[in-house]
Amino acid sequence: MSLSSPVFFVFFLCVIALYWALGGSRRSQQVLVLAANLFFLAKFGPVYLLLPVAALVDFAVGLRLGAPDVAHTLRKTWVSLSLVLNVGLLVFFKILPLADARNGAKAWGWLFTLSLSFYCFQALSYTIDVYRGDAKPERNAITYLASALFFPTILAGPIPRTAKLLRQWGKPFGLTRQQGAAALLLIATGLVKKLLVADYLADNFVNRVFDTPLLYSGVENLLAVYGYALQLFFDFSGYSDIAIGVAMLLGFAVPENFRTPYLSVNLQDFWKRWHISFSSWLTDYLFESLPKSRAWLRSSFTYAILTTFLLGGLWHGITWNFLIWGALHGAVLSLVFVWSQSRWKKGRKRRLGEGPVWARVLGAVVTFHFVCFTWIFFRAQDVATAKLILQQIASHTPGTENLAPALWGVLGFAAVAQAIPQVWFDRATRWADAVPFWVQGAAVAGVVLVIQQLAGKGSAGFVYGAF
């Protein structure tokens, strides 16, 4: 059940109506959200109803980690149990596609249709936070399950920190007019991003070129790479917008995931703007856990950065393509770190985004094209296909006869829209806030109907839903 499908919105309308009606009872709301979580999981397959069992293990681990009389050695044992459980689930769902590919048929894929990556990251954030003393253990199983299996984010993020969700249950439910307006605007924006931009680019251009690059000119291959960069951004940020908006209507704040990433002045800046909840998770729970030495600052940090991004690449899939993608990002980020350390020693350290305008523009152009170069390996079926695309681009063969006028229009709109600053959204929220809430809801429903008509065959799956 995709967050962009009509079925989801019928389901969510039922949930939100009951949730608001129960506004005076947080315990009843928790039971409702838990039931909604289970229903959402069951739509992907009955096997996912076993997931609460894994969540209860983490709940029990949290209780033991929070007990005052537990020895340090036992605490390590308990947190290791959570690590083994969640990393085991993660590895299992990454190896499953390889087994299916080896068998030549979907032996198990039909049964396990939902990746559990985002659940595993969220679950690990809880047990690690409790182990480190950064969070207190939750003592009510219903409250924990309502948060750990939170249906808006379990499919493809953003990755909330479970401890922060749990703390929000402690506050009385409330939704201001401005919050409601922002939520509905986010949902409508996310639907436009997904159905009218991302899916259009994928179906009408990007997929065709990446599947058969030799049938297209060098210019068309290059434009397809740009198109994929825009498709991926609008697909993933569209999902994040919908998830954040849905969570807001339930009274929860989940982290933002994108902040005009293709305007980044260098790669470090890019990872502060792209998939923010994932990059911050990698930083807090993987990078910070790796051993580093002040005596060997550059080498130890380079090792930690490379390790983090190699594992981050393999998280997307155990293939050479994703390994190359992670290695490229890790290598350049290491160079950025070494360069910044050199400037620090020379007393010329600048914050990100500072410096002459020409330097920022040049940095943004170079960074964008490097990211696009790595997206080729990220999107291509295999390394051989990625090489073919690069060869076609290098051939400089002209010709854009395969690009319809409508496609040029969508590409141009996407290129401009991805750079719209947050302040514009805030201004639009204030305008929407002046309109009665029922009008806002009717407007969103109208947007859904119009999009469904324009989108034609409906919504494709979210790209990151497969990871």
Image (cartoon, rainbow, N blue to C red):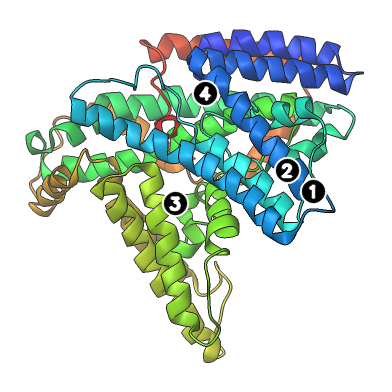
Q: Is residue 43 left or right of residue 109?
A: right
Q: CA distance from mark 2 to mark 1?
A: 6 Å
Instruction: Point out residue 230 in the picture as x, y percentages from the top left corner.
Output: 38, 40
Task: Report which residue position mark 4 lands on.
Answer: 191
Residue 192 is situated, as x and y percent measured from the top left of the image, at 50, 25
Residue at 48%, 74% in the rendered image: 301
- Alpha carbon separation for disc pair 3 and 1: 42 Å
Q: Residues within 10 Å of mark 3 (few under 14, many from 20)?
A: many
Which label sits in the foreground, 4 or 1?
Answer: 1
CB-based contact (under 8 Å), mark 2 and mark 1: yes
Name the quadrant containing residue 99.
Answer: top left
Quadrant (top left, top right, bottom left, bottom right) of the C terminus: top left
- Judge depth for marks 3 and 2 and give the one in front: 2
Q: What residue does disc 2 label?
A: 62
355 lies above or below 392: below
Count of picture labels: 4
Q: Is residue 461 above or below residue 345?
A: above
User: Label 3, label 2: how many angstroms apart (C-alpha)?
Assistant: 39 Å
Within 10 Å of disc 4 (Cα), the crowding (few <14, some 14-19, many 20+) is many
Residue found at x 27% / y 20%? 106
- In three-dimensional space, the C-alpha distance between marks 4 and 2, rounded to whole angstroms, equals 37 Å
Residue beneath label 1, please?
Answer: 66
In the rendered structure, find residue 262 and report the number of the disc placed on it: 3
Element at label 4: helix
As shown in the figure, which amino acid type bears the numbered disc 3? Tyr
Who comes first in sequence, dot 3 or dot 4?
4
